[in-house]
Image (cartoon, rainbow, N blue to C red):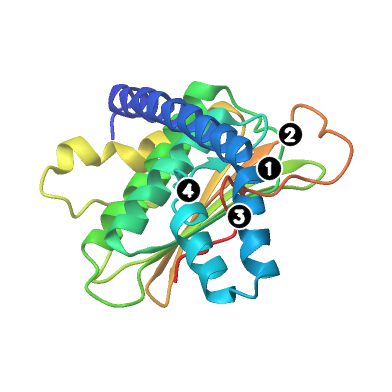
Amino acid sequence: MHETEIKALTSERMTEYYRNLAGNTEEIRKFRHDMRYHAQVIDTYLDQGQTLKARDYLKTNIGQLSYRNLIYIEGLPVVSAILSDIQAKCKQLNYRFEPEVYVNYIPMDDDDTSIIIGNILTNALEALKKDNTQDRFILFEIKAASEVTVISCRNHYIGKLLPKGTLYRTTKSNASNHGYGLNTIQEKSAKYNGLMEITTEHQVFHIQIFLPNNYPQESGNPRKTTTINEETPNYES
């Protein structure tokens, strides 16, 4: 995708992300406010030995809490918004999406971060849309060592990739539009003295971006990707 397209898409993702985040916050506030009353009702049922009624009450009143399934990474709102958007699309299309982020920062500005990660994940999603197998997945990871930050993405694909120099030629019908993706990723990586590496083995496309760390990591444990509702009990049967 062109830079202007990626930037526009990132802006839309950020707007939707904060809208959903605000909605989640309101849901949680209401839930906490009402929780003590629900607890009293359930406690009464249990005191009376009416276990089934207590369970039905849980399903009806607490199970109805509907969170928007957002990913939150402290200090990385752009990455959070992109991953949340891809996660929602993968869930809708029944693709497996596993994002793992273990960093507090990425040594790039937000625009270039959105262009690189946006292109990587858009390409991966497009590849899965052509995949008629059951093995449709995207495994995305950002991690850092002392000197380098690594952005990694693996996705299954079918068919043959068309080599174009050290990259691959797009198989999309509007190739003039979409052929910029890998070139753009490579150019943006080079801007930060980074490297792009692509391997294709066993029908898995694996792209890695290696970026020199220009700023010290925060002390303490690295942060892992957090899905906002991942620890919320699910009372749905």
Residue found 25% across the figure and 41% down from its top: 179
From the viewer's perspective, is 184 left or right of 220? Answer: left
Cβ atoms under marks 2 and 1 closer than 8 Å: yes
Cβ atoms under marks 3 and 1 closer than 8 Å: no
Q: Which residue is mark 4?
A: 65
What number is the disc on residue 20?
none
Badge 2: how crowded within 10 Å, few (<14), some, or many (20+)? many
Q: Is residue 31 above or below residue 166?
A: above
Q: Which residue is mark 2?
A: 213
Name which of mark 2 and mark 1 comes first in the sequence. Answer: 1
From the viewer's perspective, is 4 left or right of 24? Answer: left
How far apart in space, not on screen, are marks 3 and 2 (Cα)?
Answer: 55 Å
How far apart in space, not on screen, are marks 1 and 4 (Cα)?
Answer: 38 Å
Q: Which residue is mark 1?
A: 149
Give the amino acid type for the residue marked by disc 1 in the picture. Answer: Thr
Q: Is residue 90 above or below residue 144?
A: below
How far apart in space, not on screen, are marks 4 and 3 (Cα)?
Answer: 17 Å
Residue 188, can we see it? no
User: Residue 212 location in percent, x, y?
Assistant: 70, 36
Q: Secondary structure at mark 1?
A: strand
From the viewer's perspective, is 219 left or right of 1? Answer: right
Name which of mark 1 and mark 4 comes first in the sequence. Answer: 4
Residue found 69% across the figure and 32% down from its top: 105
How far apart in space, not on screen, are marks 2 and 4 (Cα)?
Answer: 41 Å
Q: Which residue is mark 3?
A: 41
Cβ atoms under marks 4 and 3 closer than 8 Å: no
